[in-house]
Image (cartoon, rainbow, N blue to C red):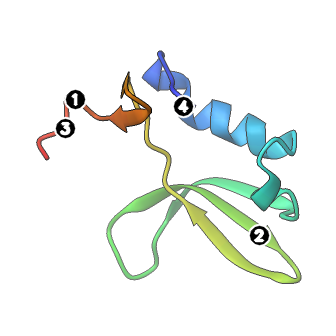
Amino acid sequence: MLCINTLRTNTLVREAIEQNLINELFCYSKICGEVKYVSQNSRINLLLQAKTLINCYIKVKSLILLQQQCSYFPDAVA
């Protein structure tokens, strides 16, 4: 999925998960946003949790360029 408005990226991904649009993630019952790592000084965008599954840590990236079925971050240094 490509996102034009980078301010909406996290919200769109969260909504897709909540509406069970991502098959691999439909079993998770709890979604937490902007969670800090315990041992690091950084955050993840979403943490998915369920009683019978391991935690799923999600870092959302907004791809803004698509060429020949490949997505790019044209404003990134790398």
Q: Nearer the viewer, residue 71 or 5?
A: 71
In space, the residues marked 2 and 3 are separated at their CA atoms by 31 Å
Farthest residue in the top direction? 4
Q: Which mark is residue 76?
A: 3
Question: What percent of the width, then of the height, locates residue 49?
Answer: 77, 69
Depth-wise, is mark 2 or mark 3 nearer the camera? 3
- Which residue is at a point 39% across and 82% down the rendered structure image? 39
Q: Nearer the viewer, residue 15 or 36?
A: 15
- Is residue 70 left or right of 2 when viewed as pictured? left
Q: Which mark is residue 1?
A: none
**Which sits earlier in the primary sequence, circle 3 or circle 4?**
4
Q: Quadrant of residue 29?
A: bottom right
Q: Which residue is mark 2?
A: 49
Question: What percent of the width, then of the height, locates residue 45?
Answer: 53, 51
Question: What percent of the width, then of the height, locates residue 31?
Answer: 75, 56
Q: Are marks 3 and 1 in contact (CB under 8 Å)?
A: yes
Q: Are marks 4 and 2 in contact (CB under 8 Å)?
A: no
In space, the residues marked 3 and 1 are separated at their CA atoms by 6 Å
Q: What amino acid does circle 3 point to?
A: Ala
Q: What amino acid does circle 2 point to?
A: Gln
Q: Are marks 1 and 4 in contact (CB under 8 Å)?
A: no
* Element at label 3: loop
* Element at label 4: helix
Q: What amino acid does circle 1 point to?
A: Pro
Q: Which residue is mark 4?
A: 9
Depth-wise, is mark 1 or mark 2 nearer the camera? 1
- Which residue is at a point 38% across and 35% down the rendered structure image? 71
Q: Which residue is mark 1?
A: 74
Rendered-image quadrant of the N terminus: top right
**Which sits earlier in the primary sequence, circle 4 or circle 2?**
4
- Which residue is at a point 65% across and 69% down the rendered structure image? 56
